Amino acid sequence: MLKRIISAVLCVMLALTAVPTYLESTGNSITAEAATDYETPYYYSQLSDDAKKVYNALKEAALECKKKVTVKANIGQEDFNMIAELLILHDPITFNVRNITADNVTRKSASFTIQYSYSKDSYQKMTAAYEKQVDKILAKLTDDMSKYKKIRVIHDEIINRAVYDLDSSSNDNIYGTLVKKKAKCDGYAKTFSYICAKAGIRTTTVIGFTDREMTGDMHMWNKVYFNKKWYNVDLTWDDPVSNMADNTKHDYFMISDDEIGRTHIEDNLSFKVPEATDSTIGYYEVNKKYAEDLDSAKDLIKKGAVSAVKNKKTVFDFQCSSKSVLEQVKKYVLDTKKMNSVLKSVKKSTGVDVIPEIYSYSFSEDLYTVKIMLFYNDTDLDYYFVGDDPISEDMIDTLAAFGIK
């Protein structure tokens, strides 16, 4: 949720003390160079040359928590809006910047005042603390991993470390996400961008809405540059809000604009967002968990259950190719006799003491995904549920009848 921070950016005004300058925009094209430069946020390439000078000076000052900056550059209001948006919203390491005001702007120079959310000492301690956590995640990336696998590991590691929380004071930055382990959308997105950059993977942050009318709070997610194409990744929507164990989602992992467009709409303020047109390397396609029709879905249910049971996992999932296939799958999964028969067969073939009579399920009406939860004898509630969120009385009573308490 980005309403508060975006409102702050939009309130920033440039106080010109001379006739406004009219710079010809030179940075609105998406270039290959921008997609492989990891040192600066992706949108940096869309700044004018003078705006880049100002951005670099302000960023250097922000890292040292300096309050006053003067730059020899010629910028106008549009340039300043882009600079402020880039530093406050998109750059993951300048999260201490709360506001920027222009004190004096002429055709030759510009002076600024930066306001901070944290003291220099606090900011440096926060940076040192999150860098330790970043190093732990990077250590999980091995030389023999594909780039695709590295992106997934970073995605999963962040999700498994943080919980969605709108109340934490630092939930919009890397420190809050990795150290306090509480994040909202911009915390997830900036942390993902930062760690990917450290791993040599180009990303950008995207601002938009999760309602088609664009009336609610704004949202932030990522795009990733992979094999010379861009893909959407939304860690916030992949981090499950349920208290089910073994429940990391990949519905919003490496998907196209058309796919994410069912629930998200871009509104990136000052910058042009790269397009993501390819829909062939989402998590489910790559991992062969994609059902073209009901028969292939039945096969995936059997294979998914066998794999889960062999590893005594609680959850398996797959994706349907269309809404009509999803509707057919829903009818099949809701048919307890058919599902009980499948699970009895799985129990017999694996020798694992899964309970065929009970299972849980969920469906995504937007991305056509199916998630099925299995239960085992000689387990307790902690095997299936984590955190402090309450479990429904009906679920407790059902599981208790099978000895799970």
Image (cartoon, helix red, strand yellow):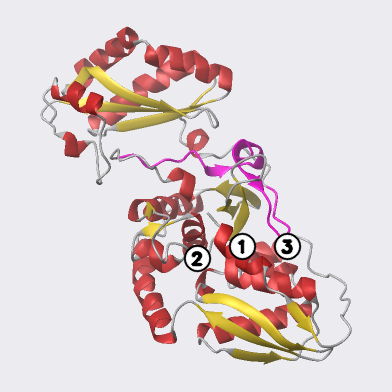
Task: Say what secondary structure mark 2 lies in.
Answer: helix
Q: Is residue 258 in view?
A: yes
Question: Label 2 is placed on what type of residue?
Answer: Tyr
Q: Residue furthest top?
A: 337
Of badges 1 and 3, nearer the viewer stands 1
Q: Are there few (<14), some (14-19), or many (20+) residues within 10 Å of tag 3?
A: some
**Residue 169 versus residue 63: which sits nearer the camera?**
169
Residue 143 shown left or right of residue 286 in the figure? left
Q: Are there few (<14), some (14-19), or many (20+) residues within 10 Å of tag 2?
A: many
Q: Earlier in the sequence, mark 3 or mark 2?
A: 2
Q: Which residues are magenta?
A: 246-275
Q: Is residue 252 magenta?
A: yes
Of badges 3 and 2, nearer the viewer stands 3
* Quarter residue 202 falls in: bottom right
Is 99 drawn above or below residue 223 in the view shown? below
Mark identifier at residue 6:
1
Q: Which residue is mark 3?
A: 270
Task: Say what secondary structure mark 3 lies in.
Answer: loop
**Residue 152 versus residue 90: which sits nearer the camera?**
90
Is 157 drawn above or below residue 64 in the view shown? above
